[in-house]
């Protein structure tokens, strides 16, 4: 099934993400309302998360009625075109709640089933409305911050790598993740916890981070950011040749990835993954 060029799909992703970002920013200024909690009391959804996803869904359905939709806050629908939009309306929801200016609208379009193990990402846009930053990538056309082309940091020894990571919404997992970070922190320059996987991946793409890794992410958290990091020259994956996924996502320049992989594998052996009692 033919589809528009990735750059054409990117134009739509960027336009919709900017419109959605403006709404999220406005609602932020008006005051944030928690609508519910999901997998744990810490895992909140705000009224704005839902409103922004509804806006995105409507704009994409108007522009491309045959496409599927796979978003964080509403039921997935499959399409007839072979393309699916993978959407996180506000990635970094806790930052959004606290007014920390690191949250983002993340929109990607993939070919094939909305499954990271098999999909082919064609275009992605990540908009941070609080900082007015627009990260974009189309398959084969590079990664950009506005009209500035992005490249990952190369030739960084692990001992001098600034590493980003994150913690889940379930306490047992956070304790396990902190043990791994405790084992790693003496082997890298320092650790950053930005609070949005989409912005962490864009930070690797633009060289604000040398390396990012996290366990427990959902496809909508990283669909666009992973394409942007890849198009900036990063390797994105898990351990060995595994594709990135819920179990683990790593992103770094290939040479740093090769240094980091055995270190992380050794930390996973030292700190076996704790049994978790939450769904997420
Ligand atoms: C967040 C991720 C972040 C992770 C948080 C959460 P959300 O997504 O972007 O990397 O550490 O636990 O999953 O819930 O804000 O869409």
Image (cartoon, rainbow, N blue to C red):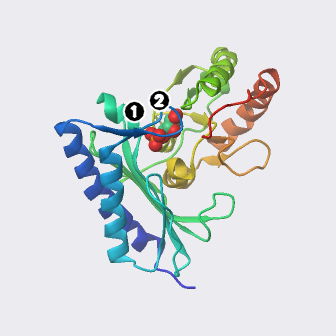
Q: Nearer the viewer, residue 228 or 63?
A: 63
Mark with earlier residue (2, 1): 2
Q: Is residue 26 left or right of residue 2?
A: left
Q: Nearer the viewer, mark 2 or mark 1?
A: 2
Q: Position of residue 275 (x, y in %)?
A: 74, 29
Query: Of helix, strand and loop, which one carries label 1?
Result: helix
Q: Can I make out residue 43 in this image?
A: yes
Q: Quadrant of residue 120?
A: bottom right
Crowding near the residue tagged with mark 1, few <14, some 14–19, many ≥20 C-alpha atoms within 10 Å: some
Q: Which residue is mark 1?
A: 94
Q: Position of residue 167 (x, y in %)?
A: 56, 29
Q: Can I make out residue 128 in this image?
A: no
Q: Which residue is mark 2?
A: 42
Q: Residue furthest bottom?
A: 1
What is the count of numbered marks?
2
Q: Which mark is residue 239?
A: none
At horizontal 57% and vertical 28% (from top left) the residue drawn is 163
Quarter of the image with the C terminus in it: top right
Query: Of helix, strand and loop, which one carries label 2?
Result: loop
């Amino acid at each position: 099934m033919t589809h528009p060029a990735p750059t054409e799909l990117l134009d739509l992703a960027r336009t919709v993400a900017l419109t959605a970002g403006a709404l999220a920013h406005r609602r932020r200024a008006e005051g944030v309302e928690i609508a519910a909690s999901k997998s744990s009391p810490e895992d909140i959804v705000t009224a704005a998360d839902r409103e922004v996803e509804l806006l995105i869904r409507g704009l994409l359905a108007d522009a491309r009625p045959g496409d599927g939709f796979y978003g964080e806050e509403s039921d997935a629908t499959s399409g007839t075109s072979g393309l699916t939009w993978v959407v996180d309306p506000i990635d970094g929801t806790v930052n959004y709640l606290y007014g920390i200016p690191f949250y983002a609208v993340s929109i990607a379009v993939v070919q094939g089933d909305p499954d990271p193990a098999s999909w082919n990402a064609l275009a992605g846009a990540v908009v941070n409305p609080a900082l007015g930053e627009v990260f974009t990538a189309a398959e084969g056309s590079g990664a950009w911050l506005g009209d500035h082309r992005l490249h990952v940091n190369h030739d960084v020894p692990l001992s001098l790598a600034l590493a980003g990571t994150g913690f889940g919404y379930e306490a047992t997992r956070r304790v396990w993740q902190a043990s791994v970070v405790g084992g790693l922190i003496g082997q890298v320059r320092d650790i950053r916890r930005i609070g949005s996987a989409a912005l962490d991946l864009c930070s690797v793409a633009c060289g604000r981070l040398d390396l990012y890794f996290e366990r427990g992410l959902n496809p909508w958290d990283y669909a666009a950011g992973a394409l942007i990091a890849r198009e900036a020259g990063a390797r994105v994956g898990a351990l060995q040749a595994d594709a990135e996924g819920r179990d683990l996502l790593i992103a770094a320049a290939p040479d740093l990835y090769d240094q980091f992989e055995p270190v992380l594998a050794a930390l996973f052996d030292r700190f076996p993954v704790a049994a978790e009692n939450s769904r997420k």
